[in-house]
Amino acid sequence: MMGDVAIRVENVGKQYRIGGPSDAYGTLRDAIAGAARTPFHALRHRGSRTCTEEFWALRDVSFDVKQGEVLGIIGRNGAGKSTLLKILSRVTRPSTGRADVCGRIGSLLEVGTGFHPELSGRENIYLNAAILGMKRAEVRRKFDVIAEFADIGPFLDTPVKRYSSGMYMRLAFSIAAHLEPEILIVDEVLAVGDAAFQEKCLGKMRGISQSDGRTILFVSHNMDAIQHLCSRCILLDHGRIAATGDCRATIARYLSIAREQARPDDWIDLSSHAGRSGTGEARFKAVQYRSDRCSVGFQPYSRGPLDIMLAIESNSARSIGSLAVIIADQSGTKLINADTVLRDLSVDLQRGLNLVKLRIREVNLNPGVYRLGLWLADPLRVHFTDRPFDYVESAIEFEIVNVEAGGNGRHPDAVVPCEFDLLPVD
């Protein structure tokens, strides 16, 4: 008996194997030929082994979620968050333990899951809603509300293969939210929407929880959203629960684990950085930062200049209209956006490795630890595709030290004004 518990997870583990033989499907001819080769293959490879490695994405995870509770799940990339949600959504089975769910589930794990690219948005509303368990009469009754919330306007009868990822997201979230599930599971997919739509989605989730008493599991790297939406939080680290309970305390624990501050003048290699997205036609390879003051070890300081050196690799010669250095606080709130598109500046890249230097004239921020994000895009192209060349949400963390009077902290429109220049590289 689960009583008032909507989700019960008991000692759940998920194991994957890295490497080993392929499980691809073969033809009858391949099977016959393989059987004939087997004795000779065994003799030739006697004593050899296929190298496989076992990897535990989750290990001994246990928790309960009460009906009507909004639970936040946080952790670094690769901590096991998405794997846990896939187990709860019945996309995959756990290797150990069990996960019991009481009620109908609405899941948003990947943008466009359950959509047919050749069908229109209208047709996919019916298709996706049916996959999620909604009856046709129910879809008809809610169709106008779903379409209005998705706000895709004249594109409702356009094949979804022509949709941007943002339009996909709006439609997918609208269907899942209006399914009226007892349990709504939302992964980081909201990150592809614009700020207005993200706030709209968060408002909808608050309404689902507070008015209808439905249960929500919410995964996000936006600590502001987690703190304002969730009543409790779980921190996953390397597949295990590292902390659980009050959101503020759990977020503080997460930030202490995640903090890896870079030192001034050190080149930070971004080649294998996990937290990035984009086409990869041009991408950030490394980043370096410094201030102008030797007395503080060239650490950035309030109201002082900040130089950012960027190593960018491009697969062809191109002119970049939007290169941005983004500074956010520890909760993920964007404070400074030094974007060349705001100054009508462009950056010409040659094929291969390029060095670009950007100087923020005054860092108008209070002392503390901040995150540095990097953005590279063609403004016209990204408007239609929602895909930049490269976006590294949190490339490094750095500290602004206290030398004189502090900065502005948070500006009313969530972006602190800044002046910046592109400088020649020595």
Image: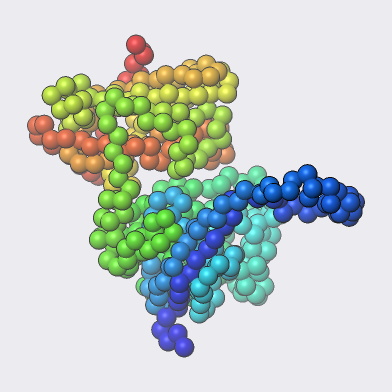
Query: In the figure, is residue 348 to the left or right of 332?
Result: right
User: Residue at 32% across / 20% down in the picture?
Assistant: 421
Q: Is residue 348 visible?
A: yes
User: Residue at 60% across / 51% down in the picture?
Assistant: 52
**Residue at the limit of the structure toward the left, as seen here:** 404
Total marks shown come to 0
Residue 35 higher or lower than 274, as above or below: below
Query: In the figure, is residue 216 to the left or right of 93?
Result: left
User: Residue at 38% across / 40% down in the picture?
Assistant: 394
**Residue 413 is drawn in which quadrant?**
top left
User: Residue at 21% across / 30% down in the picture?
Assistant: 300
Query: The C terminus is located in which quarter?
Result: top left
Q: From the viewer's side, name the closer residue of 36 and 323.
A: 36
Q: From the viewer's side, name the closer residue of 32 and 278.
A: 32
Residue 206 lies, in percent from the top left, at 38, 66
Residue 129 lies, in percent from the top left, at 62, 67
Q: How is the image coloured?
A: rainbow
Residue 193 lies, in percent from the top left, at 48, 49
Q: From the viewer's side, name the closer residue of 170 and 133.
A: 133
Q: From the viewer's side, name the closer residue of 76 and 68.
A: 76
**Residue 412 is drawn in which quadrant?**
top left
Residue 366 lies, in percent from the top left, at 17, 39
Q: Is residue 159 visible?
A: no
